[in-house]
Amino acid sequence: MTTANESPSPTQTSPEPDWEAGVRRTTQEGRLLALGPAPVTTGERGADVNAWIRRKTEGWLDLQNGNLLFGAEFALMFLSLTVLVMMGGLAMTVDYYLGHNEFTWIPLLGLGGMNLLITVPWGLCMHFLGNKAVKETPPVRLNRQRREVAMPRWTTGKGLQLPFWNSNSGLIAYIVLLLTIGFVFSAITQENASDEYRSTLVFWGLLTLGTEILVISTYLFIALRLKKKHDPKLVYEIYPWEKLVAYIETRQDIGPSLMATHTVLTLAIPKPNDPESALAAASINVGHETAGLAQWECIRQFMENGPEACPDPKEDETLAHYKTKCRQARKEMSLVPWLGKKVGDWFFQRYLAHIITERRIKTLALKSLPEELKAWSAPLPKEQWAKPSEALQNLNQQLARAYERGLKFTQMGPVSEWQAGREEKQQQKRGRGRFRA
C-alpha cells in the first residue's frame, strides 16, 4: 500500500553530490539503485506493473496503492451471511411449527439477534475500517504543468489518552452487552417461571441494557470528538520534480527458517535541515528491479511527455469492467461453472462491492484532501507551464543515443561519471584523428 511520512535510512535519501541517477549503494539490508534527483530516461518501457496509478488527468497524476475491491468484498460477505442466517432461522421456525402445530418466533428471533449482535456489527466494522484506510492513505500527486510533486505526510498529534480505555476495553464492553442481551432473551423464554417473576427479570434486564447503551454511546460520542481534535493532520509537501529523490531498493529479510527478497520503489522529499532523512516518502513493492524501472519510467513519461505517454489507471475495480467480465464469462463458460461463479459473486456481493469501490476512488479519497492541494491542482494556461531544465533535456538526449547503441542504465554507473568518460573518449578519438592526419 502507498506509505506516507516514512523515513528511509540516511544512506537512502542523501541528495549530496555522490547521490545521483545511476548510483548504486550497498546497505546493511540490501542494495540501492538511484533514479533521481535529475529524473533521466532509463531506456526502459514504462508500465504500471503494480497498479500504482489511481487517477490521471491532463494536468496531474495520482499514485495510490491498495486493493480496495478486496476490502469491500470482505465487508459485504457479512451481508450475505446475514441473509443466510435469517433464511436458516425462518426454516427452523417453520420446522418448529410443523412439529408442535403452533407457530413460534423463538428460533427466528434467536438467529435474528445473532445477526444484529455478531454478523451485522462485524460487517459494518469492516466497511468503516475500509473507509478509514482510504482516508489515511492519501495519494501522491504529480503536477506536470507545474513540474512539482505533492507528497502527503501526517503532522505529529498530541497523542490523546482516553480515560478507562485500552486495547481490551472495546471487547469487554461488547461482551457485557452480549451477556445482558442474552439475559433478557433467556428471561423472555422461561416457561416454568410465573408471569410476575418473568416480567421483573425482563424489566431489570432491559433497564440494565438501556443504561449500558446510554453510557457507552455517551462515552464514544465524547471520545470520538476529542480524538478527532487531537488526531494528526494531513498536509502536503510541494517539491520540485527534478529534485525529487527516487530509488529502487532490494532488501533481503532473513528469518529463522525463511529468506525473502523484497524490491521497493521509493519517492522521497529530504528534510531541509537534515538532507539524509526524509520529510515525506511514498513506497510501493515492485517485486524486481526491472519492474521498478518500468514503474518509474511510467511516472517519468507522464511528467516529461504528457498523459498520452503514460498508461491509464487499471479498470479492474470499476463496475463497467465487472459487467464486461460477467458477459464474457457467460459466453465462455458452461452452465455449471457459470452458476458456481454467480454463487460466488452473490456471496461476496461483487456488484455492490464495485459500486462501493468506485465511490471510494472517485469521491471518498478526494474528499479528505486539503483545499490547498485542490487549488495547486487547478489547470494553468499553457504559457504558464513550467519547462524542463536545459541540463535535463541535454542529458536525456545523450542517454537516448547511448541506449540506441546498446548501453543499459543499470550498467552505466553514475550519470556524471558516464558523461566524464564519454567526453574523455571523444577527446581521445579527436586526438588520434589529428595524429593520423
Image (cartoon, rainbow, N blue to C red):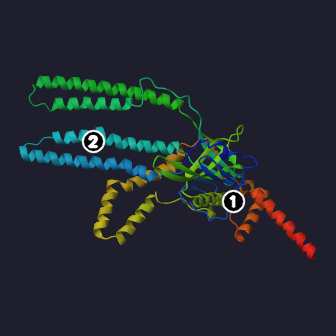
Q: Secondary structure at mark 1?
A: helix
> Seen in the image, is 22 located left or right of residue 173?
right
Q: Name the disc covering residue 115, or none.
A: 2
> Seen in the image, is 204 located left or right of residue 267?
left
Q: Earlier in the sequence, mark 2 or mark 1?
A: 2
- Determine whether 412 is above or below 123 in the image: below
Question: Dot 1: within a 10 Å radius of its alpha carbon, few (fewer than 14), some, or many (20 or more) residues?
Answer: some
> Seen in the image, is 124 located left or right of residue 152?
left
Q: Percent x, y for residue 157?
A: 56, 31
Q: CA distance from mark 2 to mark 1?
A: 55 Å
Q: Amino acid at mark 2?
A: Asn
- Residue drawn 45% across and 62% down? 321
Q: Amino acid at mark 1?
A: Glu
- Determine whether 22 is above or below 219 in the image: below
Q: Percent x, y for residue 7?
A: 61, 41
- Determine whether 303 is above or below 234 in the image: below
- Determine whether 276 is above or below 80 in the image: above
Question: Dot 2: within a 10 Å radius of its alpha carbon, few (fewer than 14), some, or many (20 or more) residues?
Answer: many
Q: Percent x, y for residue 268?
A: 64, 46
Q: Which residue is mark 1?
A: 304
**Residue projecting furthest to the bottom:** 437
Q: Percent x, y for residue 208?
A: 27, 24
